[in-house]
Image: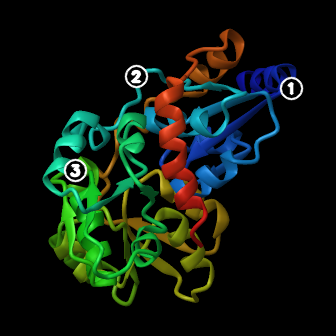
Amino acid sequence: MRIEQEIQTLKAERDAVILAHNYQPGEIQDIADFTGDSLELAREATHIRARVVVFCGVHFMAETAAILNPDKTVLLPAADAGCPMADMITGEQLRAMKARHPDARVLCYVNSTAEVKAESDCCVTSANAVAVARSFPPQQPLLFVPDRHLGSYTAEQTGHDLILWPGFCPTHARLTEAHIATARAAYPGAPVLVHPECPKPVRDAADAVLSTGGMCQWVKERAEPVFLIGTETGILHRLRRENPDKTFIPLLEQAVCPYMKKTSVEHVLRSLRDLQTVITVPEPIAQRARRAIDAMLAIH
């Protein structure tokens, strides 16, 4: 426990708080002050009192925390923890898309860079994309970037004719309906929960389509003893910790995001000790990106 104790000591000295995404390694979730999905983390980031925020996740998440906390020091322990989906669209590409659809508003998945958020009207997460889309009139043209799978799910649930950017999450794209069929055969009667970043055939074959935070809430309210989980495997740690009497089986053991797994307790210790790596967002971009994030947080 020596390294964990060092982290706790440094955290007190630095007046720091540790936030972790549900996909982080179990040992990171165990030392975090708060663990959640993107929406839960965004909301948590709006009322942080600590002077230092150690964000255990990927770069766009730390950027969001920095945008929401311009007076705090926001640290990303694994400096090279990026997001392939976020890299699938740039601000320049979004500006070109907007020029082709001048009457459209832009819904931007929070899994995107600050520059892309700054070009958007409202951010969304997997937990609230449907609610955000429903807040716009049905006749309002909407661009949805960058995840085409979450976008198509949102269109299905709302009836909005969304104009989708062809981005995707490589980890969720690995899941297939064959994985569900195999899991159902092995565990008859067990509900299948999948993330809306999954392709449509996977979503259609599941019992529920939920964000990771939604999955955590859903299983608490169910009596079934076994659940089949279709998302990045990091969520299994939280599910098992919060529901020790239930069994959680991944649809695919290999559904692992290598970037989410870059953070180690050694990284967190070094981050607190050396105050590295500091994540900042240029003020003009941060101001515009914050408007899109605030617009999302205002919708319930």
Residue 174 placement (x, y as % from top left): 20, 55
The tag earlier along the polypeptide, 2 or 3, is 2
Where does the C terminus fall, quadrant-wise? bottom right
Residue 213: x %, y % from top left: 55, 65
Task: Give the SS element for disc 3.
Answer: helix
- Residue drawn at (40%, 22%), measured in percent from left and top? 80
Disc 3 target residue: 98
Q: Quadrant of residue 191?
A: bottom left
Could you tell whether 96 is left or right of 142 in the image? left
Residue 199 in view: yes
Q: Position of residue 2 (x, y in %)?
A: 76, 22
Q: Is residue 129 left or right of residue 270?
A: left
| Closer to viewer: mark 3 or mark 1 | 3
Residue at disc 2, secondary structure: loop
Residue 212, given in percent of the width and then of the height, sits at 49, 63
Vertical side of 132 occupied by 66: above or below:
above
In three-dimensional space, the C-alpha distance between marks 2 and 1, rounded to whole angstroms, equals: 26 Å
Residue at the spot of label 2: 80
User: What residue sits right under mark 1 in the picture?
Assistant: 12
